[in-house]
Image (cartoon, grey):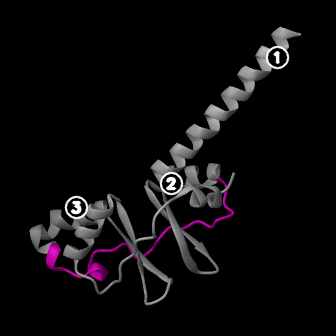
Amino acid sequence: MSVKTILKGKTGDLVTCRSEHMMETVATLLTTHRIGALPVCDGGRKLVGIISERDIVGNMAKAGAGVMKMKVRDVMTKKVVVCGPEDSIKDVMELMDRRHIRHLPVLEDDKLVGIISQRDVMAHRLKETELETNVLRDHVRVGKAV
C-alpha cells in the first residue's frame, strides 16, 4: 500500500498557510480545523516550510506569548521531511518514527498534493490489519467446513 491510498481516503480541503501570515492566524487555523500542523507554501503549491504545534510551543518557551505576534517564517521548520504518493506506508511509518515527526507533507513533481499524519497512517494500518484478520478467520472457517 502507498501514501496515495491514504490521500484518497482523506476528506476536506488541504489547509495551508503562507510564510508572511501571523502566528495568531496559524493558531486559529490549527484550532478551527482540528489539525496539528500546516504546510507553509508560496503563492502556488511550492512547499517552503511546515508549522506545527510543537514549533509553536518550542518558540513560546523562548519568546513567551510574544510568539503570537511573530510571522510564520520566524517560527516554521524550514528543512521539511517529505514523502511522495508512491512511497509505501511501511517506509513512511519508519521515517516518521526515525525522525520523530507526526506530519509529513506529500509532494509530487515538487508540488504539495497533501499531508498525512501519524494518525492517518495508524488508522490505515489498523484497517489493513483488520482485513487480514478477517481473511485469515474466513480461511480457517472454510478449512473446518471441509
What residue is pinned by disc 1? 142
Q: Amino acid at mark 3?
A: Val
Q: Is residue 129 above or below residue 12?
A: above
Q: Nearer the viewer, residue 113 or 99?
A: 113
10 Å crowding of disc 2: few (<14), some (14-19), many (20+): some
SS category of the residue bearing label 3: helix
In screen coordinates, is 13 left or right of 62?
right
In screen coordinates, is 11 left or right of 73?
right
Q: Is residue 34 above or below residue 24?
A: above
In screen coordinates, is 138 left or right of 99?
right
What residue is pinned by disc 2? 96
Residue drawn at x 58%, y 73% is: 107
In screen coordinates, is 35 left or right of 135?
left
- Magenta-colored segment: predominant secondary structure: loop
10 Å crowding of disc 1: few (<14), some (14-19), many (20+): few
Query: Is residue 64 within the magenta segment?
Result: no
Q: Is residue 112 above or below residue 95?
A: below
Q: Quadrant of the C terminus?
A: top right
Task: Return the residue found at the far bottom.
Answer: 43
Residue drawn at x 29%, y 61% is: 53
SS category of the residue bearing label 1: helix
Residue 88 circle label: none
The boundaries of the magenta stretch are 68-88
SS category of the residue bearing label 2: helix
